Amino acid sequence: TTIVEPPQPIVTYRYHCDSSFYLEPLEEMLKDAKTYGLLVLDRREAAVGLLVGKHIEAHRTLTSTVPGKQRKGGQSAHRFQQLRLIAIHEFYKRIGDAASDVFMAVDQKNFEGILIGGPSPTKEEFESGDFLHHELKKKILGLFDVAYTDESGLPELVNAASEKLSDIDLIAEKKLIQRFFTELVSDSGKAAYGEESVRANLLIGAVEVLMISEDLRAERLTIRCPNGDHEAKLTKAFKPGEDYFSPGPCPVCGYSMEVVEKVDIVDELSEMADQMNTQVEFISTDFDEGSQLMNAFGGLVAILRFSTGV
Ligand SMILES: [Zn+2]
């Protein structure tokens, strides 16, 4: 039995009868901790949230005291306009402060950027002013038209930006693979591929970025002779439905060896990477270089911090 504490709340309910456990939503969570800042606003209200993996969290809502466009009798038009602009500016400031608080609290390693939604020209006005922390301003990925600017505007914003988001993911993955290929052809010794080499480099902490194909399915087995004279580890491609695997005879005494432990290779390598502060990236096979990673390099490559010769 394996006990897993979900890293994010489980938001779907599912009744499912099958011969195997339905783990896809959990696997999805483990794969993607990428976080985007979400902000929707107009002159009356605003909402600040985060997109963590595929889960949207609402963090703050704000309402303004900006007066409507109609002035009361007796007030000079000029004075009214001035007060209105000041109130709008104040509201943008409050939004900027709230958003900066929420976005700066995110682990910046996973923080991919900020999406802003709302009607025009409000969101453009907000973007061009200095309302967000200056470090965050650089991380604005785009402005999107949304109709709602309360909490319900947050999922609307994610929908509106979804194409942009998948492009960003893909571009980041492409850049990484291109870096790997550049190291590979430059003979710098900083590109490792093949399970054995990647594993050896991981173990000594030489890997800067570990790239694992999303299509990689393999298990790491520990095999042992019942007579206790031999133990070894081996990697086997995962075959669905295969519940028995014979590791063959013991090289010492010839007796049939047994599988005593079985772990998913992705879990095993990710754990090794964690211990050595190695960045792990999962690469989809939806583009040329990505499928090349799977088909030509066995789904496993690494960019090294320095050349190791292994
Ligand atoms: Zn033996």
Image (spheres, helix red, strand yellow):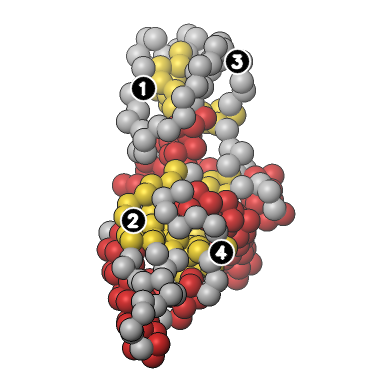
Amino acid carrying mark 3 in the image:
Glu
Q: Which mark is residue 61?
A: 2
Is the C-beta of the residue carrying label 3 under 8 Å from the nearest atom of ligand 1? no
Depth check, mark 4 against mark 1: the one in front is: 4
The mark nearer the N terminus, 1 or 2, is 1
Residue count near mark 2 (Cα–Cα under 10 Å), binned few <14, some 14–19, many ≥20:
some
* Relative image position of residue 268 (x, y in whole percent): 42, 36
The mark nearer the N terminus, 2 or 4, is 2
| Circle 4 SS class | strand
- For the N terminus, the image quarter is top left
Which residue has dot 4 on it?
144
Residue count near mark 1 (Cα–Cα under 10 Å), binned few <14, some 14–19, many ≥20:
few
The mark nearer the N terminus, 4 or 1, is 1
Which residue has dot 1 on it?
2
Marks 1/3: CA–CA distance? 20 Å
Depth check: give the residue in front, 11 or 81: 81
